[in-house]
Amino acid sequence: MKTTSVHGMWSSRLMFVLAATGSAVGLGNIWRFPYITSENGGGAFVLVYLGCIAVVGLPILFSEIVIGRRGRMSPINSLKELADDAGASRAWIGLGWLGVIAGFLVLSFYSVVAGWTLAYGFDYLQQLVVGAPPISDPGQTFENMLASPGKLIFWHAVFMVLTVGVVALGVEEGLERAVSVLMPTLFVLLLVLLGYGMSTGHFQEALGFLFSPDWSRVSGSMVVTAMGQAFFTLSLGMCAIMAYGAYLPSDVNVPRVGVAVAFSDTAVALVAGLAIFPIVLSFGLDPEGGGAGFIFTALPLAFNEMPFGIAYGTAFFLLLSVAAWTSSISLLEPPTAYFVEATNFSRKQIAISVATLTWLMGLLSVFGLNIWREFTLGGKDIMGAIEFLASNIMLPIGGLLTAVFAGWVLSNRITREELDAKMPAWAFNGWLWLTRVVTPIMIVIVLLGLIGII
Ligand code: PHE
C-alpha cells in the first residue's frame, strides 16, 4: 500500500478539505444552481437535487477518494493499477480517459463563464476605483458582452492563464497556497451577500420559492438536470476528486472529510440561492426567468440600489471568479498528473499545453454566443450543448463506472481499510449497499429516461 504520491501530498486534513471544497464550490453553486433552479421552477427541483446529493453524490464522493488514495497516481494510472491488482480488465482505464475528456469539455466552457465573472469584477472595480459609469441597463450590458467575441476571448484567456499558473506550480506550492487563502475569503463574502438578501423584505418569499415543492413540475428532464447538477457541483464523475484523493495522507478519515466537503458545497449553493432570489424578487423580476445570464442581469440591479452596492458588486464578482478558479484548477489537475506520469515533459509544459488546447476548445462556446448564434444543437447554443453533454451525460456515466469500480472491483478488504476502521459497521455497509446497488440503478434509470427508453 502506497503512502505517498509522486505529485506531492496535502500537508494536512484541513488542506484536503479546503482543496476539495474549493473544487466543489464554484460557478456550479453560484452561477449554475440559481439559474437552473430558476428554469426548473424552484422547490421540487431543489429537493430532487438534494436527494441526488445524498443518495448518488455522497457514495460516489467516498468512492472517488478511496480509489484515488489507494492508487496514489493520476486517475488513469490509479485505475490501471487497482484493476491489475484485483485481476480486473484494464479497460477500466477508460473511466480515467472519460474523466479527462469530460474535464476538458467542462473546463472549455467553464473558463468562458469564469471570464464573464472576471469581466464584471473588473468593471465594478473600475466603478469603485476610478468612478467608471454604473451598469444602468444590466440586460443590455450582458447582451453587449456576449456580442463581443474579442472581450469574451480576452477574459477567457486571462482566466485560463490564472488556472494554469496554479496547476503548473504543483500540489504544495500551487494548489495549497491558492486554496488556503482564497476559500475562507469566499465564505466571508458570501455571508455578506446573504445578509443583504435577508434585509430586502423578500426573504420569506424566496424561502418559499426554493423549498416549497410543486410536484407537478417533476419530469424526466428535470430529474436528469437535477442529477447532472449534483455531479457537477460536487465535481464528481470525471475523476477530479479521485486525483485530489491521491494526495490525501493515509491516516485521514475519508467519511468525515467526504461529508464535510458535500455539506459545505450544498450549504454554499443554498446560501447563494437564499442571497440571490430575494434580490430577484425585490426587483420584481421573474424568479423563473432563468437563463445562463441570470445572475449577471439580475444582481447588478441590486448593486445599483443597495448602499455600498459598487463595493458589494466588486466583492461578489471577484468572489465568484475566485470560486471558479479553485474549481478549474481541479479540472486541469487529472490530465496534467497523467501526462506528468506518462511523458518526460515537465509539469509546467504539460499544464500549459493542456490549458491551451482547452482554451481553443472554449472558442467554440465563445463564437456560439455571437457569430455562430444561429447554430443550435437540440435547441441549445454550442455552450449549452457542451454543458448538457458533459454534465448531464458524461458525468453520470463516469459516476456510474466509479461506483461499480469501488463497489465491485475493489475488494471489501481494501474499501474497508480505506474507509477507516473508525467507521461504524452499519455506516460502511450502508455505503457499500448504496455504491453497489442503489446508486448505479438510479443513475441507469435516469440515463435511460434521458434517451427516452422509459
Ligand atoms: N464543482 C465545480 C463547480 O461547482 C465544477 C467542477 C465540475 C469542478 C467537475 C471539477 C470537476 O463549479
Image (cartoon, rainbow, N blue to C red):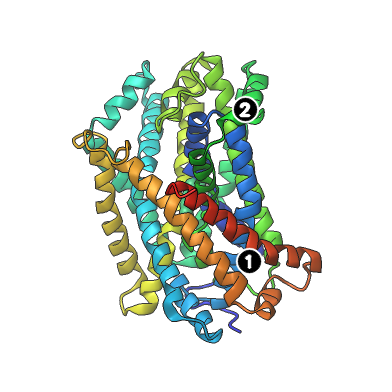
Using the numbered discs, state the Cα–Cα distance from disc 2 to disc 1 in whole angstroms.
Answer: 32 Å
Looking at the image, residue 12 sits to the left or right of residue 95; the answer is right
Q: Residues within 10 Å of mark 1 (few under 14, many from 20)?
A: some
The residue indicated by pointer 2 is 214
Point out the tag, 2 or 1, that comes first from the N-terminus.
Answer: 2
- Indicate the amino acid at tag 1: Arg
How far across and how far down the image is residue 405, in percent?
A: 55, 71
**Residue at x 40%, y 57% (from the top left corner):** 103
Checking the image for residue 183, the label placed there is none
Asked whether 367 or 97 is in front, the reply is 97
SS at mark 1 in the image: helix
* Amino acid at dot 2: Asp
Q: Residue shown at 40%/30% (left/top)?
A: 293
Left or right position of 22 against 51: left
Q: Is residue 224 visible?
A: yes
Residue found at x 68% / y 55%: 259
Q: Are marks 2 and 1 in contact (CB under 8 Å)?
A: no
Residue 116 versus residue 252 in the image, above or below:
above
Residue 374: which quarter of the image?
Answer: top left
Considering the numbered disc 2 on the image, is that residue within a helix, a strand or a loop?
loop
Residue 169 in sight from this viewpoint? no
> Tag 2: Cα neighbours inside 10 Å, few (<14), some, or many (≥20)?
few
Marker disc for residue 436: 1
Q: Compared to 67, does 331 lie above or below?
A: above
Q: Position of residue 270 (x, y in %)?
A: 62, 37
Please state, as top left, top right, bottom left or bottom right, where the N terminus lies in the image: bottom right
